[in-house]
Amino acid sequence: MNAGGAALTTTLGNFSADQYFSGGSTASAASGVGIAGTSDPALYQSERTGSFTYALPVANGSYTVVLHFAELTFTRNNQRVFDVNAEGKKVLANYDIARKVGALTATTERLTVGVTDGALTLAFIAGKASVPKVSAIEVLSTSVQPCTLPAPSVTAPSAYCVGSTAALLSSHVTLSAGATLLIYPSATQGSPIPDFRPATTTAGTSTYYVAQVANGCESGRTAISVTVNSVAPPAVTSPLTYTQGATPAPLSSSVLLAAGGALRIYDGPSAGTALPATFQPPTSTVGSVTYYVAQVVNGCESNRQALVVTVTAGPTTPPTSSTYTITATYTTLPALRTASYALLKYNKRIGLQLTDDDGGKVDVTCIPQVLHGGTAANGVTYPGISYTDGTGRSLRPGFTFAVSTLINGQPGRDGAPNAAYATWAELQPLRAQRTIGFSNHSANHGPDYPATQLADADATFLQKLDLIPRTVTIPGGFPGFVAATIADAKKLAVISQGYGSNGESADGHFSEVRYLDKVSVPYDPPTILILTRYFLNQDWGAPARAWVDEKFQLATDEYNAGRRVMLSAFDHFPESQTANLAAFYAYVQNHPLNVGGDNVWFANLQEFAEYEEVKKKCPISAPVVSGNTLTWTIDKSALPSYSLYQDASLLIPAGGLQNVSVSGGDSFTANLATGLVNIAKLNAATLTATRAATGAVRSTSARTQATAAARPTPGETAAEVTIYPNPATKIATVAFTLPAAERYSVHLYNNKGVLVERIASGQGPAGAQYSYGISSSKLPAGTYMVHLVMGTTSKKFRLNVGP
């Protein structure tokens, strides 16, 4: 029956005119519109549409009903969606002609229907969109085989590799002449889907089903399977360790391949050209270099596996060098050939420096266990904290212990021992841990005679720990310690909790930056770092995390502006906070602003200060070109003999970088992909002090030899200045008049040139008169020098203190 049209003769037989319907209306295609997928287009150019029912008179029995459809109106999916019931049972649900074959294309649906009441009832019911329609209806005896179109032939595609590009599924299907391809996601259910390229992101096998339709007849479905293969990375032996200068085995000897696998060796974690399969790592330079290996099996290449080659120093130690030499080999020399220091060591985005004040017992029973692994005083065993140096080498975090010598074991400053504080014998083993640093926190943690306190503490550090700290942690914010630090040539940094609106310390030395936790260098000479720090107040839980959130955002903003920040915080750390300290490090390492979980440098204060010293005092030469190599030299001759950390982190051109070697350091690591080169050098500092036979500090001369002489002042003269001694009060008065509007200062030094006290400093107008008293009541007997500086003029005079 030709629905909505007149009787029609077709290749399928004779179709009667539209009859036996109730409801709906007729429609037809525009003149000249063709219908694809059929040799009888006229059968599909008319239709009954709307909500309607057919009641076809037939004998009771089983019939094959063929419904013919072609979408004449709509072109997109979901514009016509309807249901069909046969004999009261739903046989088509949410039927969408355009989704199945598209517009102006013939298609059919075959149904098996049983009739018991003498009438075959077909109801076309409106669904989710628009109204139903049908082009023609066939009612066939079940003994008739109306459709004989075979299923299409398929050729199974070759297996693909993970990440490759698959061919269109249709390229593996051969259709009969004039037939149209249908692709299904299941063997019997679902609507056809468009032609596509199978995904290759995941290994495995996926099965699809294809059919063909011609002249309104759809074939059965045939399965077509797509297989995606992945290859596991090869097993490696890593790290490999060679003695400097040894003959290395080919890298392939440390790689276990799968059966039939072919080796690929690379110098970076991604991209790049493979090195020869016979590659032997160079062993001329001490350090660690990471290579990457993969294997190719059945045409698929695996992910890359890191293989670290470490070269250790030979049995003879080379003489100390005043230079570092960095040699880089390239496939092609880069256009930009300069080398520069990373702003922060290891080229990290954020610096973090933590300090525990006063030398508490936790310095030996809790903090090292959290940092380096071990069982702490709270009974918990910690695995230790690890991060990398940007080249794959694992590091432990740095930490600073600010020790006050007379508090150490004597917290009441009266000689009474206290088990809450570590002894020098307990602190001594920490000297062997490279990441632990010590800071001078004064001798008696009091306000009197800052320079003498620092000198006394230095002498005790030298006697007990064989070191002199190059940093000062101001006790209690007392005035005078910044000036005393500036006057000590060995010192590089002084730090205290911020005082005033912008971190101004109590003695008027001002931090020039906007934030409390950044480095400031407002003084001349610029080798002194004036730092402030945040007080965590014995709670490393929520307050510490809030501080990290705020300061990491600050540091990120600075990093995005091309600057980097060293954040500093401290506490008088109680044992009860041990678990919170471990959680604090986990919070920092998992912080979303710690990009990649490995972009924070956990420094100790001296390590940080001496890295700044290296950057300022150790120039990097222009590169020397030889073939495809560039060689840079770092001149360390300006570093003092007592510098401890002589490390350097360099950024060299990375494009085409094949190999890096370094001489002059203890070791080095390199990342060929980023051009980061880390040079490690722990100097054997030259320090002396006069000691008695018992090992105790014998006299003031011992203290002065443990610190540096005062820095010379430009324009210094030997002119005498009149002083007015008062024997009754043991006070000497210094009086002077400013010849011009300028700054002035008065300092008192002992006969070894060590600063004893900062008497005064300020700025005044021309003609201003000043007088200052110097009390000798607390000074040991001896000769002292009073040093007066007015602008660029310097004068000094002697002061003798009798017994």
Image (cartoon, rainbow, N blue to C red):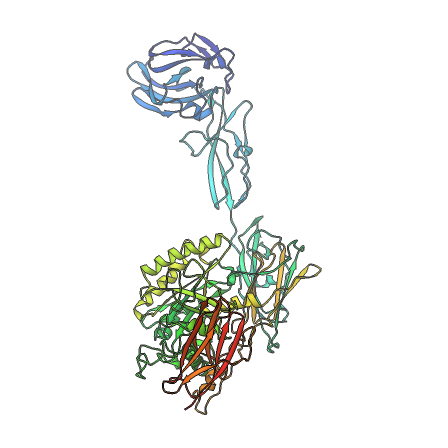
Q: Position of residue 474 (x, y in %)?
A: 40, 71
Question: Image height check: is 255 above or below 223?
Answer: below
Residue at the extreme left of the image, as rendered:
117
**In the rendered image, which quarter contains the N terminus?**
top left
- Closest to the observer, 353 or 162: 353
Dividing the picture into quadrants, the one containing residue 66 is top left
Q: Residue at x 54, y 52 (%)?
A: 302
Q: Position of residue 77 (x, y in %)?
A: 42, 26
- Closest to the observer, 584 or 547: 547
**In the rendered image, which quarter contains the C terminus?**
bottom left
Q: Residue at x 48, y 54 (%)?
A: 559
Q: Position of residue 20 (x, y in %)?
A: 34, 10
Q: Residue at x 42, y 15 (%)?
A: 135
Q: In the displayed structure, does residue 446 sit left or right of residue 691?
A: left
Q: Residue at x 38, y 15 (%)?
A: 49
Residue 234 in sight here? no
